[in-house]
Image (cartoon, helix red, strand yellow):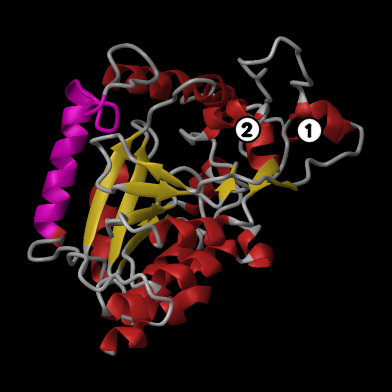
Amino acid sequence: MNNEAYIKGRGAQINPTNRFESVVRETDPLRLQEEGERPRTQPIEVYPKTILNKVASPDIGMAWSMNPYQGCEHGCVYCYARPTHNYWGYSAGLDFEQKILVKKNAPELLETALRKKNWEPLAIMLSGNTDCYQPIEAELGITRKILEVLWRYRHPVGVITKNSMIIRDLDILRQMAAHRLVKVSISITTLEESLRRQLEPRTASVAARLKTVQTLVENGIPVNIMMAPIIPGLNDHEILEMAKTVSELGANSMYYTMVRLNGDVGEIFEDWIRKNLPDRADRVLNRIRDCHSGELSDSRFGVRMRGEGKIAEMISQQMHLARKLYFAGKKMPDYDLELFHQTKNPQLKLF
C-alpha cells in the first residue's frame, strides 16, 4: 500500500457523489490531506420530531430501533448504513464518518413515546443503524441519558456496539440486567488486530472488545457476539476460533451476518481492498458475489444477511458446528415485559 496516497485513521478513502444531488462535490479527500487538512469529525446537531423507528425487516428480532447519531466515526469500510447519509445530503464515503448528525433531544423524544397511553413495551434496539457508543458519545453522553430513561420506565432494550465505552454505563446496565431488561451484543469482526485496524480504523481494539465481553459477563449482563460481517476470503476462517474464544469469556450466544455491499458501499469497499489488500482483492470480491447471485449485495429479506450458494452454505455449516461445540446449553435470557410502567417514580405503583 502506498501510505502517501492513503488517508490515515479513516476507512473510506473516497467520497462518492450523493445520488440524490445533481451538484458534484469534492470526491477526492486525499487532496485535502495533501494540502495539510486532515479530515476532522464535525458534529452537526439535528432536531428530529421522533426518535423511534418501527423495524419492518423480518431479519431483525426487535420491534423498534433508535439511533442517537447518524453517521459513524468508527469508519468501518463495509458498513451497510453508509448510504443512509445520502438522505441527509452527504456522501456515503468519508462524509459518513466525518459529518456526524447528533440528536441531543433523543432522550426527551423517547420519554414522550413511552408515556403514550397505547405504548406496548416491546424491545428497542439501540442502535440499529450507527453505533451508539461511537467516540463522540464520550463527550455528549446521549446514549447514557437514553439508558436512564429506559431504566426509569423499566423498559427492555438491546444494545449493539463495537466500542468498549459501554463499560462506562455498567451501573445502569447491571440494574437493568438484574431485572431482565437488557441484552448486549458486542460486534467482533475479527481476532486479527492488523485486519481490525484496516477494516475498522476507529473502533476499539480486539483486546479491548474481548475484555469488554469479560467485564459485562462478570457483572451479570447477558452478552451475544455478533461476528458481523463475515467477509469470505478475509475472516471466514476465524469462525471456530472466535466461538471458542468468546464462549470461554462467558458469552451467551454468537450470531453472524454475511457482508452485503449495498449502494455506494460496493464502490467504497472495492477502492479500499484494492489499496489495502491488492493481492486478495479479486478473490474476496468474487466470493462476495458468489454469495449474492453474482452481485455485491442482495436486498431480499431472509437472504440478504445470510447469502446463498456454496460459500454461504459452508459458512452456515461452520457456524452451526461452532455453536454445537462451544454454546451447547447456553442462551440469552428472555426480556421481562411485565415491569414496564408509565410513572416516573416506580415506587408510586405501590400505592
At horizontal 49% and vertical 68% (from top left) the residue drawn is 166
Q: Which residues are magenta?
A: 301-325
Residue 325 percent coordinates (x, y):
11, 57
Q: Amino acid at mark 1?
A: Glu
Residue 238 percent coordinates (x, y):
31, 47
Secondary structure of residue under mark 1:
helix
* Magenta-span inclusion, residue 167: no
| Labels 1 and 2: the sequence-earlier one | 1
Q: Horizontally, is 145 left or right of 232 in the view?
A: right
Q: Amino acid at mark 2?
A: Ala
Prevailing secondary structure of the magenta residues? helix
- Of badges 1 and 2, nearer the viewer stands 2
Q: Horizontally, is 346 left or right of 108 in the view?
A: left
Residue ranking furthest to the right = 35
Residue 343 percent coordinates (x, y):
38, 75
Secondary structure of residue under mark 2:
loop
* Magenta-span inclusion, residue 304: yes
User: What quarter of the picture does the C terminus occupy?
Assistant: bottom left
Examine the rendered structure and indicate whether residue 72 appears above or below residue 220: above
Q: Is residue 185 visible?
A: no
- Quarter of image, res 28: top right
Q: Which residue is mark 2?
A: 12
Q: Horizontally, is 16 left or right of 285 in the view?
A: right
Residue 172 percent coordinates (x, y):
43, 78
Q: Horizontally, is 86 left or right of 176 in the view?
A: right
Q: Is residue 253 visible?
A: yes
Q: Which residue is mark 1?
A: 4
Examine the rendered structure and indicate whether residue 82 appears above or below residue 208: above
Nearest the viewer among 52 and 87 is 52
Nearest the viewer among 127 and 312 is 127
At horizontal 69% and vertical 65% (from top left) the residue drawn is 139
